[in-house]
Image (cartoon, helix red, strand yellow):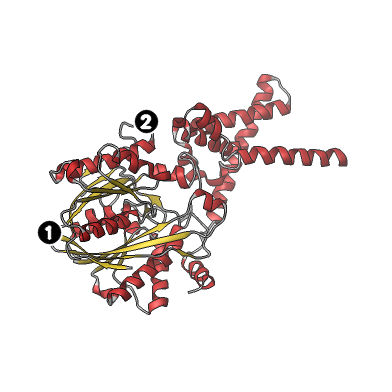
């Protein structure tokens, strides 16, 4: 059996999973998280009397805090198996990725363990976030 | 290469199941069953070596032997540079051979041990293997607490360890022959789906074994494969049918039956999965006499996955004759 035939055999045997249900769940849970974020922003603006961009920052930090604490308690992955991508795409997913990497390396020490591996998976988000931030910021300044 | 043995027997075993997650079928029959990922150790890596230490110690006590009586200890596991095997064997001062062929390590150990005993009489060999769910998650997949959405083709590594004693003293399990398989490589690159990567290796070694021993698949009461999983078993059967025109009816995949709970992805995996299923479930059923064990190993690493190298897979077969 050559490689091409074998690929066809795999394709025939493994039935593609139906993603429509997961997509619907993600849509609802993601929307729900967005709603909470909006409420938090409004509350921060009213209570702390700050600007909109500051309130966004506080909301972002709150999500990271909640995501990290839930990961540390070991319940985040259980909630995620119900909520699907609705929890990964917002900053809670970022917090989970970062905290779980740090927890894995905890036993290897603070410098070579936690310090070296905390951004193992999230490093690319940060790097390309900054790179594309610069590119799009530049384009925006040229156009507007 | 097929070897025939005439005086090699499996005398004793000591098994340890360390996680009862998803309710494994071997839960009631193991020598020791705990639900502890740490075993009073600080990290999961050290815990896995403690598992091996426990089974080796347990086996020595069970068969009333001292470490000095054992000639060779052959051990393997899934950690980088087989750390837990070396740490465990450092406690005993038994001459040690460390082996690695991923989930096929146990059968590889059996083949090496049997060859030693067949050539030199009065040797005693211990073959040990272990796997730890969290260690392999950390090593091959994602951090333990990372909430990755998993696919149906994923497998869940079994947690536990097993040690067996091989010698030329007669017992009810005779090692009859063995076939060493070759490494196969197809276009398959998805490390989530190890079943599809290992199926050709499994079918090839089975075909080779049957040709070299002049047997037909129904010579065996049972062909117990390692950890192909639900889909891998189907692919293996289809592959074997295309190669030899035989319909395999007597195949059971230990990975697929390992968890009693349904829908645990495609099943279990890990070097401990096949021996635990064989010794603590298949043998306790007392149904099969001629059994062919085929362990399958997917030899990918994190680097090979990142380099997008097609997954190499290996498989070894060993034929056992059991009398009850």
Spatial separation of the CA atoms under disc 2 and disc 1:
42 Å
Q: Secondary structure at mark 2?
A: loop
Point out the residue furthest to the top here.
Answer: A48
From the top left corner, tell me how far across and down residue B196 is, in percent: 45, 63
The chain to which mark 1 is attached is: B
> Residue at left 68%, top 22%?
A46
Q: Secondary structure at mark 1?
A: loop
- Categorize mark 1 by other alpha carbons within 10 Å: few (<14), some (14-19), many (20+): few
Query: Residue A99, position in %: x, y?
Result: 52, 33
- A66 relative position to B206: left or right: right
Residue B303 vs A107, above or below: the answer is below
Q: Nearer the viewer, mark 2 or mark 1?
A: 1
Instruction: Quickly name the residue at label 2.
Output: B42
Q: Is residue B17 visible?
A: yes
Q: Is residue B33 visible?
A: no
* B225 or B281, nearer to the observer: B225
At x 62%, y 37%, the residue is A35
Q: Residue at x 79, y 38 (%)?
A: A137
Indicate the position of residue B276 as horizontal and vertical percent values: 27, 52
- Callout 2: chain: B
Find disc 1 in the rendering and name its residue: B170
Indicate left or right for B211 with B125 as reference: right
């Amino acid at each position: 059996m050559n490689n091409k035939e074998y690929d066809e055999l795999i394709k025939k045997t493994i039935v593609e999973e139906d993603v429509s249900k997961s997509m619907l769940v993600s849509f609802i849970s993601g929307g729900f998280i967005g709603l909470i974020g909006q409420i938090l922003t409004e509350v921060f603006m009213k209570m702390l009397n700050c600007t909109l961009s500051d309130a966004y920052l506080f909301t972002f930090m709150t999500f990271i805090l909640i995501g990290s604490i839930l990961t540390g308690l070991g319940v985040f992955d259980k909630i995620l198996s119900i909520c699907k991508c609705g929890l990964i795409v917002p900053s809670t997913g970022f917090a989970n990725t970062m905290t779980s990497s740090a927890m894995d390396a905890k036993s290897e020490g603070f410098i070579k363990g936690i310090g070296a591996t905390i951004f193992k998976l999230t490093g690319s988000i940060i790097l390309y976030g900054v790179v594309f931030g610069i590119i799009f910021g530049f384009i925006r300044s040229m156009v507007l | 290469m097929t070897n025939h043995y005439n005086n090699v027997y499996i005398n004793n075993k000591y098994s340890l199941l360390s996680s009862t997650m998803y309710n494994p079928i071997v839960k009631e029959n193991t020598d020791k069953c705990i639900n502890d990922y740490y075993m009073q150790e600080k990290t999961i890596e050290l815990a896995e070596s403690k598992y091996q230490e426990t089974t080796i110690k347990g086996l020595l006590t069970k068969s009333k032997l001292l470490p000095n009586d054992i000639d060779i200890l052959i051990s393997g596991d899934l950690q980088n540079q087989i750390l837990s095997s070396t740490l465990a064997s450092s406690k005993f001062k038994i001459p040690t051979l460390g082996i690695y062929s991923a989930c096929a390590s146990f059968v590889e150990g059996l083949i090496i041990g049997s060859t030693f005993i067949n050539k030199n009489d009065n040797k005693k060999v211990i073959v040990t293997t272990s796997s730890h769910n969290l260690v392999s998650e950390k090593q091959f997949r994602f951090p333990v607490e990372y909430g990755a959405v998993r696919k149906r083709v994923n497998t869940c590594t079994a947690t536990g360890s097993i040690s067996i004693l091989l010698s030329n003293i007669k017992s009810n399990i005779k090692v009859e022959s063995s076939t060493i398989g070759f490494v196969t490589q197809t276009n398959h690159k998805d490390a989530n789906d190890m079943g599809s990567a290992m199926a050709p290796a499994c079918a090839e070694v089975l075909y080779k074994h049957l040709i070299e021993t002049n047997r037909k698949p129904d010579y065996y009461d049972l062909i117990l494969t390692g950890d192909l999983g639900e889909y891998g078993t189907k692919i293996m059967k289809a592959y074997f049918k295309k190669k030899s025109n035989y319909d395999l009816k007597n195949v059971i995949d230990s990975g697929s039956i390992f968890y009693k709970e349904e829908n645990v992805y495609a099943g279990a995996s890990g070097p401990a999965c096949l021996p635990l299923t064989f010794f603590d479930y298949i043998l306790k059923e007392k149904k099969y006499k001629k059994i062919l064990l085929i362990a399958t190993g997917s030899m990918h690493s994190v680097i090979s996955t990142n380099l997008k190298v097609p997954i190499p897979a290996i498989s070894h077969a060993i034929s056992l004759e059991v009398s009850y």
